[in-house]
Amino acid sequence: MRVFIIIALCVFSFTSLVSAEDKRENKAASDAPNDGRSPSDNRLSKIQTLIDTGKLDQAEKLLRLEGDGARFESYRGILWMKRDQPEKAIEHFKRVLRQQPNQTAVWLYLGQAYFQMQRYRESLRSLDKGKAIGSKIASYFKLKARAQERVGYIEKAYKTLSEAEKRFPLDREIIREQALLLVNAGLYAMALKKGREYLSNRSDDRDGYVILSEALRRAGRPREAAEILEDASVRFRQDAEIVGRLALAYAESGQTFAAAKLFSRSTAMSGDYQFAAAETYRLAGRFREAIRMNAFVTDTKKQLSQRLAIYLGSEAFDRATALTQRMQDAGIMNDTNRYRLAYAHLRVGDLDRAEALAIQVSDPTLIQSAQDVRKQVEKERAR
């Protein structure tokens, strides 16, 4: 199972690369004595400031007054990237490159836009053409590796990140990217080792713990996820979400009682895990604790359905049958609840109600069980 953790790209500073390239192109002119900024430069500077400060509507109004020159087209593309509309940005970047195909920075932005559109092969082609500038930026390698991974070039992606690690040894997030890549490649032991390497240098990165553990859990490796989260829970003792995620990892690895206690602890710390705590207590056979946590579930429909399951598990059949009318009033008489109530009524000797409920069950996965209830009702009547 491939796992794609959503991490905000923000790969390139949208206006800085274009601005830097403009400066290099205009260097000869700027060397002249007493040569001031042109009106065009002033307008571009104002547009850049508006985009950088998030005043996109104002920037768009100014861009409407300009022609279709390459520099203004670049900023139109950047504007649409800021608005998270890469499909529109692509058209503007293409216009720039038709006029000036050597605009390296624009190739980088086009590569990012294609990536956001999930057009990964086109993204890679564009990123390769922007390599002259991109190779100086750590995030260029991260984006390129993600695109390579998406098209199945796992080894190439890892080599890309390894090159980035050599070029930018202080950027520890590269190691995190390597760990996530190893998760997606199914190399869990190596991923865990790489993840620990990252966290040993970034023990303050709370989100790093969450991202790595979630990747492992979604890949079907809850035990490895729990190892990461155990460390996190020590460092972030009062973080309800960390404790809740640890509980989920334990639940998925079959340690229901440990999970239940952690869900309860998270709930006490302001986490919203009342239902999960009650459910894992039920699965662990700790019905008293399950009922206690179920009392705090705020969704009435979920609360009643869960309470019925708890009563059946603890063989409190009289209490289960007492929920019948409340469940009907709440509109939650689905086939699962009908069968459970039919069985409870059978166990307390209310044969007519048991039969009436069992007859209504039509779910193919429950029909045989419902028929067993009806057969048992007939046997009881024959005595």
Image (cartoon, grey):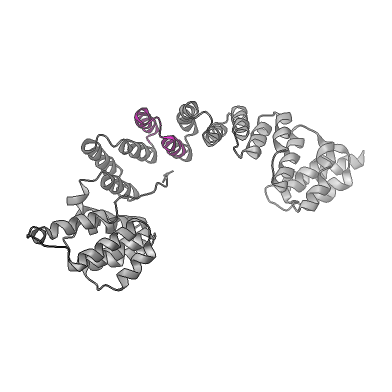
**56 part of magenta stretch:** no
Give the residue at x 34% y 67%.
60
| Among the 4 quarters of the image, the one containing residue 341 | top right
* 148 up-or-down from 25: above or below: above
Q: Quadrant of the N terminus?
A: top left
Q: Position of residue 375 (x, y in %)?
A: 82, 44
Instruction: Residue 63: tell me if it is visible.
Output: yes
- The magenta stretch spans which residues? 187-214
**205 part of magenta stretch:** yes
Please state if 369 lies on the left or on the right of 115 as rendered: right
Give the residue at x 29% y 37%.
171
Q: Residue furthest front?
A: 34
Figure disc tally: 0
Give the residue at x 84% y 51%.
356
* 299 up-or-down from 22: above or below: above
Q: Position of residue 277 (x, y in %)?
A: 64, 35
Q: Quadrant of the C terminus?
A: top right
Q: Nearer the viewer, residue 120 or 37?
A: 37
